[in-house]
Image: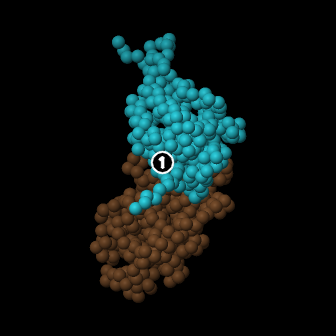
Amino acid sequence: MTHIAVPKTYKLFIGGAFPRSESGRVYEVTTPRGVFLANAAQASRKDARDAVVAARAAVGGWAGATAYNRGQVLYRVAEVLEGRRTQFEDEIVRQEGVSVSAARAQVDEAIDRWVWYAGWADKFAQVAGNANPVAGPYFNLSVPEPTGVVAIVAPQDSSLLGLVSAVAPALVPGNAVVVVASERHPLSAITLAEVFATSDLPKGVVNVLTGSPAEIAPWLASHADVNALDLVGASGLEWIDLEIAAAETLKRVLPPEEGPDAAAPALARIQALTETKTVWHTKAML
Amino acid sequence: MTIDRVVSPAHRAIEVLGDEPTESTLKRYLDGIPGVDGVGLEQRAAALGTRSIKTTSKAWALDRIIGLIDLTTLEGADTPGKVRSLVAKAILPDPADPTTPQVAAVCVYGDMVPFAVEALGAAHTTGSGEGIQVAAVATAFPSGRASLRVKLADTADAVAAGADEIDMVIDRGAFLSGRYGEVFDEIVAVKEACRRADGSSAHLKVILETGELSTYDNVRRASWLAILAGGDFIKTSTGKVAPAATLPVTLSMLEVVRDWHRLTGERIGVKPAGGIRSSKDAIKYLVTVAETVGEEWLRPELFRFGASSLLNDVLLQRQKLHSGHYSGADYVTID
């Protein structure tokens, strides 16, 4: 009997499930030469709304987990990612039209970067926080806390590495993420979502939307239940308008980045998506 | 709210039954009611739930839903302060938007009625249909497991404290055992206890607790029984038993109300309560009411939502419609 290839349906990733777009729309994903690869779901504003609801529901549990536990879960993501590497390499080759060795290098870099960020989970608070000197019988402690629900426009010209570079730092301090994947290269994003779904990451902590960032990003930027907006991949959009919309509800905003160093690994990316809580506490009577 | 009926409960029961309401005549009548086509009922309810209500219709529906809500707090941990904050929300649901309509009523335990009345002040109804009503659950809510004497005292207490509406529970144990007469007499007695010193009467809502009645046939029988005994409203649930209000159950109760209206010309109210949390669900109920008994039922005298968290969702939807962007839980109160 001859084997008939079973093509994969690329759907969205919302609240730990893989629904089709509420709108029923799909769009064609092609190779750089225009050869058809797959149909990807084209998310609507209502999918974005549902994703924010899922993220909001997840943020309490994820932020409340211990830093050590978050680090372990993120490390587990890297483990599962490693096991799926041939699938990622294959998808990158087809989507970006690069050589196998270039694809392999991108997957290596993505896994390394994910592990690097996972390591920070139980360490960044020691760097970003502080015991402040005060003139009085008090402890004065500043500690970083997650901002909450973070909406991200992922880098548009990279299939896997860009996405990892934008999502991982947001997860480290305990944020929940709604990410709009690269419009041209959405397949790796959904495969990465399958990795999230099978690696102990609580449902809703990461939600992946594929489709048109120009259509979805304004709804996320103006959404009153989104606490921060990372525009790292939004340089091709009307990003100033997005920043203005985000300012209406006092969101934290990270600007677009371009070039080979876009979304380079940095502690600053983690810290940018935190709030500093400062508490006073009396010193014990000695 | 006081509606003086043309005939007393006993009389309308006699007219319909053709005899004195006794255990045997009630049993003969209620058991003779044709059964419910459950599959058809659920299909009809599902079909009504698929209507797409958009833009101006949605804006109308959202405002109407707010005006139909019995804003409810029925917790063992209720305090006068909790009731006061509930009342504040009933009067001004969205402080950022004074055009938001007020809710129909606040629904509290009997001992919280004085605090609700006091907190409402001038916003309390004057009896002419304007203003916010105070509804009290009574008769050993939610189980109803107490002697009739206690249930009547519970009711009279709440009425004396200023309750405009009484939400009573039926004795499901007696109903399921087939002792319809007992349930009937109890509703009649509670109805009598709703009478005030000046001769007017508090509105009586009869809670069937459909989640404990098991079948649609029982829901239909209990609805008839409650209406025959003089209930002004029939209400699905206490909210303490799952499943609470569902669309098919509410539809079957609306059908009884429709039949009763055809039979006697009287309009009975319906109140689904418990489990209705989203605007989307509430709109499905509005559609069902309009399609079953008619749009004239979409007013607080004849239809209510028993809900607490529904209001916040409606307010979020309302904010979305007015501002054009999605709102969030930070922009409504924490209940």
Q: Quadrant of the N terminus of chain A?
A: bottom left
The percent position of residue B53, horizontal first and vertical second, equals 61, 63
- Residue A62 seen from this side: yes
| Residue visible at 35% across and 66% down in the picture | B212
Circle 1 is placed at which residue position? A15
The percent position of residue B241, horizontal first and vertical second, equals 37, 59
| Residue visible at 35% across and 12% down in the picture | A286
The three-letter amino acid code for the residue at tag 1 is Gly
In the foreground, B206 or B279: B279
The percent position of residue B170, horizontal first and vertical second, equals 37, 68
Q: Is residue B169 above or below residue B309?
A: below
Q: Is residue B273 above or below residue A107?
A: below
In the foreground, B206 or A82: A82
Label 1 packing within 10 angstroms: few (<14), some (14-19), many (20+): many
Q: Taking A104 as reference, is B184 left or right?
A: left
The cyan one among the chains is A
The percent position of residue B175, horizontal first and vertical second, equals 33, 72
Quarter of the image where one finds residue A186: top right
The brown one among the chains is B
